[in-house]
Amino acid sequence: MLQDQRRYMIRTLDESDRPHLYWHGVDGDGRIWLFETVVDDGGEYWPVRHAELGSDGLARRYSWRHLEDEHGFLAEGPLYPHDFGLNPLTAEEFTTLWTALDR
């Protein structure tokens, strides 16, 4: 039941006309991170899509369609891009990378 509510809320944000912003970064383990966020009324960035490419070469993607698996999950709270050293991407760059990780 909670998962259904969460899925609905994320889908509603994702399909809204609110601003969507895109981010990428690399952590200390060499993992590549991608995020699509939606800005809420308070100016916080809520993840609606998240992908990562691990040092093991495995790609993982999360969205309202696939919230979690044994490797990870879509963040359950707002994302603070500058706290994690994330850099902005264009929508086109994000889409290209998101699609490439679906192979």
Image (cartoon, rainbow, N blue to C red):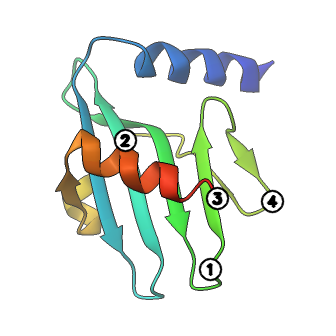
* CA distance separating discs 2 and 3: 19 Å
Which-is-in-front pick, marks 2 and 3? 3
* CA distance separating discs 1 and 3: 11 Å
* CA distance separating discs 3 and 4: 19 Å
Estimate the x, y position of residue 65 in percent, counting from the top left. 66, 30
Please tell me which residue lies in front, 90 or 26: 90
Which-is-in-front pick, marks 1 and 3? 3
Identify which amino acid the numbered label 2 is placed on. Glu
In the rendered image of this protein, does residue 1 appear above or below residue 67? Answer: above
Identify the residue under disc 2.
Answer: 36
Q: Quadrant of the C terminus?
A: bottom right
Residue 57 marker: 1
Q: Disc 2 on helix, strand or loop?
A: strand
Q: Disc 3 on helix, strand or loop?
A: loop
Q: Earlier in the sequence, mark 1 or mark 2?
A: 2
Residue at image location 32% in from the left, 68% down from the top = 25
In the rendered image of this protein, does residue 89 appear above or below residue 87? Answer: above
Identify which amino acid the numbered label 1 is placed on. Gly
Dot 2: within a 10 Å radius of its alpha carbon, few (fewer than 14), some, or many (20 or more) residues? many
Q: Earlier in the sequence, mark 1 or mark 3?
A: 1
Which-is-in-front pick, marks 4 and 2? 2
Which-is-in-front pick, marks 3 and 4? 3
Estimate the x, y position of residue 89 in percent, counting from the top left. 21, 52
Residue 103 marker: 3
Estimate the x, y position of residue 36 in percent, counting from the top left. 37, 41
Horizontal placement of 20 versus 15: left or right?
A: left
Identify the residue under disc 4.
Answer: 70
Identify which amino acid the numbered label 4 is placed on. Glu
Residues under numbered marks 2 and 3 in contact, where contact means CB atoms less than 8 Å apart: no
Residues under numbered marks 3 and 4 in contact, where contact means CB atoms less than 8 Å apart: no
